[in-house]
Image (cartoon, rainbow, N blue to C red):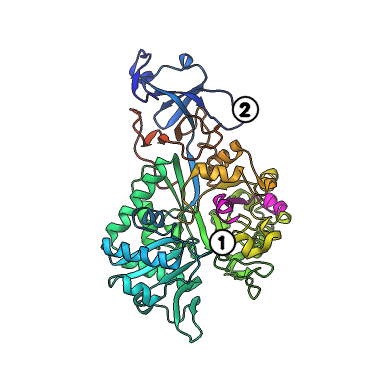
Amino acid sequence: MNSTATSSRPASDGTAARGTLLVADRVLTLGHGRKAARAVLVRGSRVVWVGDDPSQAPPHGDQVDLSGCAIGPAFVDAHVHLTPTGLALTGLDLGEVQSGAELLQAVATYADAHTGRVVWGHGFDPHGFPDELPGPDDLAQVAAGRSVYLSQVDGHTSIVDRRTLSAAPLARAEGIERDAAGAPTGVLRREANHIVRRWSVGAMEEAELAAARREAVRHAAALGIGSVHEMASPDVMGLEDLDAWLEGDWPIEVITYWAGLDLQTALLRDLRHIGGDLFLDGTLGSHTAALLGPYADRPSTTGHLEFDDDTLTAWFLEAARAGLQTAVHAIGDAALQQAVRCWREVDDRLAEEGLHDAVRRGRHRLEHAEMLSIDLLDDLAELGLVVSAQPAYEARWGLPDGLYADRLGTERAARTNPFRAIADRGIGLAFGSDANVTPMDPWGTVMAAQHRRHPEHEVSRLEAVSMSSLGGRHAARQERYVGVVRAGMRADLAIFEGDPYRADDPRGTTCVATVVHGRIAHGELALPDAPGRATART
């Protein structure tokens, strides 16, 4: 591959000469009526020509030889938590620990080698651990006097040290696990987990958080991701973190959602999207996702709904009247039924006010939707709801002896994440990672959607690519001006070595360059006409 800009046909005047022609082995255009292409002309922030014969391109200034490469639309990660992702990349990643003892050793090693007021770790998965999790006194002993916050992989359970239990405002919080004697075990769920996470973020140094943010977007761009949907929340990283993403100057596009019930926070910041991690329920791993029937491995519970119907309906209605798109975290079948039930009520009320089809035009989102039942699909299609899903969940937890089977039993586990049925009903489907729950990995996402343990739920390679790019644009209501490689569309491109769109296994493919708004976000290509950085507000 030769990515050096070389002189091309000069135009008779400087205006026509602007633009760079990218010539590769293949250009994946997506969209209707797509044709074979090898070359893309980028001028400013736009694609102005796509074709198979570079000699037929309009006049331009430079040409870049990308032999051995393929060009496609930049990926979109439709559900991320960027600052926690950056903290995992720059700090204590617990994704590989296999036991409680290994987890404790990882904390001890990290605490010995790093400074900072808080030992923040993420990614441990106790499902399958042969021993118990370390207790609060164990963590305090190895943490060298610092607070410890360790988040389980799903983000809905944490373990903390004795100092944090004493310092954080947990007096009446729900979700504090206790032993037979009534003493806290250090395991926190639901409200208690949210409180301690916020407290821990507040105790961290701003320089550490800023470095994590920079690393998260750098990492995304290096994977061919040009846009991310940041799911900010008062229960995840808080308002200061939201403002940092809104005010920052980032090489990729960061579209922010805010999960507070009070719409004023979003309206004062001119946001167009709210929710994202507004929790209607919890997670399967923490036994807090709201199910219609009991958990297979804990028959005493069906999880929890976080809101009653009246509260949720009022929030949906207020947002719809304000013209805001909503997104809600809904994993269990009971939570998904509640979301549809409340949107039905809102749709009826708005119709009585003469606002017909207002819900459908809003393109409201259901995040995760792991237990979406087939009998709800007609409702989703009629209401215009969009599903934002994470195929990596199936690759990680959908195995015969995996978490889905343990929590749900084999029959219900065989029905999770029905991507094929969703797509066949014409329902918008956007793929993401939920990083830092599962890593940002667009080609891993594509493979996980294409290869399912239950083949009836699979989608094709190009469908999965589309759901990982154009699907995210549709979910953010952007598809009219970005998402496919076509003249007139915004130049958001990903350039890969080889042809991962046809490869047997595209995972691990090297991203040569990522282009966002016509500007290089990753790589060394020369695009002299590129404008400034991508905006954080869209």
Left or right: where 114 falls relative to 294: left
Residue 346 lies in quadrant: bottom right
Left or right: where 81 falls relative to 343: left
Residue 531 lies in quadrant: top left
Pick the quarter of the image with the N terminus: top left
Magenta-drawn stretch contains 260: no
Between tags 2 and 1, which lies in front?
Answer: 2
Residues packed near mark 2 inside 10 Å, few (<14), some (14 to 19) or many (20 plus):
few
Residue appearing at x 63%, y 72% in the figure: 298
Q: Is residue 446 above or below residue 189?
A: above
Q: Earlier in the sequence, mark 2 or mark 1?
A: 2
Q: Is residue 41 visible?
A: yes
Q: Position of residue 317 (x, y in %)?
A: 59, 61
Hey, what amino acid is under mark 1?
A: Glu
Left or right: where 443 falls relative to 460: left
Labels 2 and 1 touching (C-beta < 8 A): no
Q: Is residue 474 visible?
A: no
Q: Position of residue 478 (x, y in %)?
A: 52, 42
Residue appearing at x 49%, y 82% in the figure: 179
Q: Position of residue 18 (x, y in %)?
A: 36, 22
Q: Position of residue 88 (x, y in %)?
A: 39, 56
50 vs 488, nearest the viewer: 50
Residue 462 lies in quadrant: top right
Q: CA distance from mark 2 to mark 1?
A: 40 Å
**Start-end of magenta stretch:** 377-398
Label 2 element class: loop
User: In the rendered image, which residue does mark 2 sit on?
Assistant: 33
